[in-house]
Image (cartoon, rainbow, N blue to C red):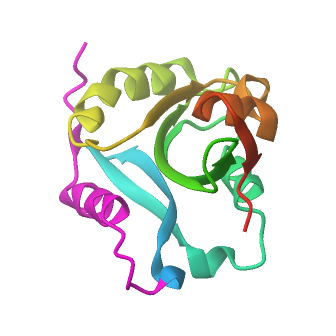
Amino acid sequence: MASGVQVHDDVKTIMDEMKVVKADSDQNERIRLVVLEIKDGFIVIEKVLQEKDLANQDVFKQFLSLLEPSRCCYILYDCHFETKESSRKEELVFMMWAPETGHIKEKMRYASSKDSLKKILTGIKHELQMNDLSDYGTRQSFGERMGKGVVRLEVT
């Protein structure tokens, strides 16, 4: 079901920036969290948090704080974690937040617009839909969604 909502070019640009992280680039400029919203018929960027914005903060807690109890959104999350097999992994996560307490029309609009956004989200390793913090709102449950053997989530 198509909604007619289009993805703004800025979203495509920021997605490309998140996918291509150069080893010699300033890590403080690295984009870690992007909140997207539907506004005036477009999926647009609402908020961008870079590594420097999250200095000395728990990135996972910041991620959870972006999930408003009655408002839908999409989130791009550059998730860092450790597994039993490797020392550290960094993978992109696309998430649709459609809280149970949100307005039904808004939830339907976000659900029907998700496919137009997914078309440009090449390189996304994980796709999640959350309707309540009990879905994946703990480090353990979120880590399990990242794959087997995750031992630590968002460790600096």
Would you say residue 112 is visible in this rendering? yes
Q: Residue 79, position in %: x, y?
A: 57, 52
Q: Is residue 22 magenta?
A: yes
Magenta stretch holds residue 90: no
Q: Locate residue 26, reporting x and y percent.
A: 45, 87
In the image, taking residue 124 as reference, residue 55 lies left or right, namely right
Nearer to me, 34 or 109: 34
Q: Position of residue 22 (x, y in %)?
A: 34, 75
Q: Nearer the viewer, residue 125 or 49?
A: 125
Q: Judge from the rendering whether residue 145 lies leftward or rightward of residue 90; answer left or right.
A: right
Q: Residue at x 54, y 25 (%)?
A: 129
Number of callouts: 0
**Does residue 103 appear left or right of residue 126 in this picture?**
right
Q: Answer above or below: position of 84 versus 9.
A: above
Q: Which residues are magenta?
A: 1-26
The residue sitting at the top extreme is 1
Quarter occupied by the N terminus = top left
Reply above or below: 75 against 22.
above
Residue 137 point in image, percent of width and height: 76, 35
Q: Is residue 138 visible?
A: no
Q: Residue at x 42, y 38 (%)?
A: 125
Decide: is 96 above or below 79: above
